[in-house]
Image (cartoon, grey):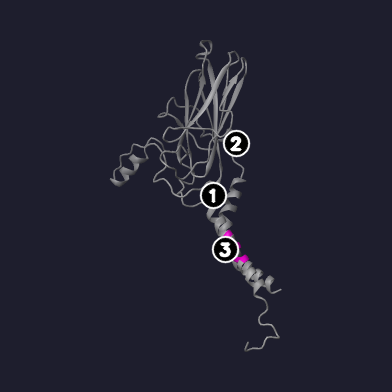
Amino acid sequence: MRVSRVLSGALLALGPVLGLALGPAAASAAADSTPSASPSEDSSAPTEAGTSFRTATEIDQGQTATASGSAGDYLYWSFPADTGQRPTVRATVKLPAAHTGQTWQVDVYDGLRRRQACQYGAQTRTAAPGTASVELACVLRTVRAWSEPWADDPLPGTYYVRLTVLGLKAADLGLPVGAELRVDSKDIGGTAAVDGSLAEPLVPGIAVETKAEEDDSSASAVLSSIEPDDGWASGWWSDRWVWTAVGAVLAALAGIGGYTLTRGSGRPRHVPPGA
């Protein structure tokens, strides 16, 4: 009975702590369950694509961007990805009724223009003659807050998507095509958290902007204005802290229970007080 009373009191005392610790995770889960607007309702979605890294069309995650072009064009988009996110890029190419076999590929590059490998997904696909469309996908690795300079890990900042056709035949050169692109991310959280963070996210022009702020100048040469809706993460906070706190609480409860069980009820009755 005494053990149960001790454990019950400890749980009641630590209940608010657990509630505060798990509050952000619960709020995040509730936000994820909120239905989002369908692509057809998003009038701000881009309807064209860039032709190079510098002219890449900026899109937000969750938007479905569209573009029209010709077979043989390079189509570029850019989007922001923050710490703890695992982006998934999906592209659909709509082909004309008459065409030969075409092989399409989607590539993703980080803020340093390093090509990022796909964990899985059909990054390259061949459309048979007469096929109306071809769908591509690339699931990137989880974006890390910090990495060694020699590593090729995904880091927070701007990411570029390039959609192109490979080995195009002369008969298909210049045929009209349509493209749809959508980027979504899954928040991985503390399981992928690392110590340390970048001084600034890998966004084009961020160094120029920082220097302009230090010089108190109104001139700006920032090439990219996209960022996550809630801003860039600082890199130090993750839900790993929550589970660390929960583990510490459970360890304390286990220590209290073990001490209570092994302490016994005090001095045995047959032992004299002076012994």
Q: For the point 58% across and 15% down, which residue is it?
A: 101
Q: Does 56 appear in magenta?
A: no
From the viewer's perspective, tell me whether residue 266 is left or right of residue 139.
Answer: right
Q: For the point 53% across and 10% down, which residue is it?
A: 171
Report the magenta residues as a range. 247-254
Residue at the spot of label 2: 38
Q: Does 251 appear in magenta?
A: yes
SS at badge 3: helix
Where 266 falls versus 152 (above or below)?
Answer: below
Residue 4 pos. (x, y %): 69, 70
The answer to which of marks 1 and 3 sits earlier in the sequence is: 3
C-beta proximity under 8 Å, tags 1 and 3: no
Comparing 104 with 71, the one in front is: 104
How far apart are labels 1 and 3 at the CA level? 19 Å
The answer to which of marks 2 and 3 sits earlier in the sequence is: 3
How far apart are labels 1 and 2 at the CA level? 30 Å
Q: Amino acid at mark 2?
A: Ser
**Quadrant that contains the C terminus:** bottom right
**Quadrant that contains the N terminus:** bottom right
Mark seen at residue 17: 3
SS at badge 2: loop
C-beta proximity under 8 Å, tags 1 and 2: no
From the viewer's perspective, tell me whether residue 2 is left or right of residue 148.
Answer: right
When asked about the image quadrant of residue 99, the answer is top right
Residue 91 pos. (x, y %): 56, 28
How far apart are labels 2 and 3 at the CA level? 38 Å
Mark seen at residue 190: 1
Q: Amino acid at mark 1?
A: Gly
Residue 110 pos. (x, y %): 45, 35
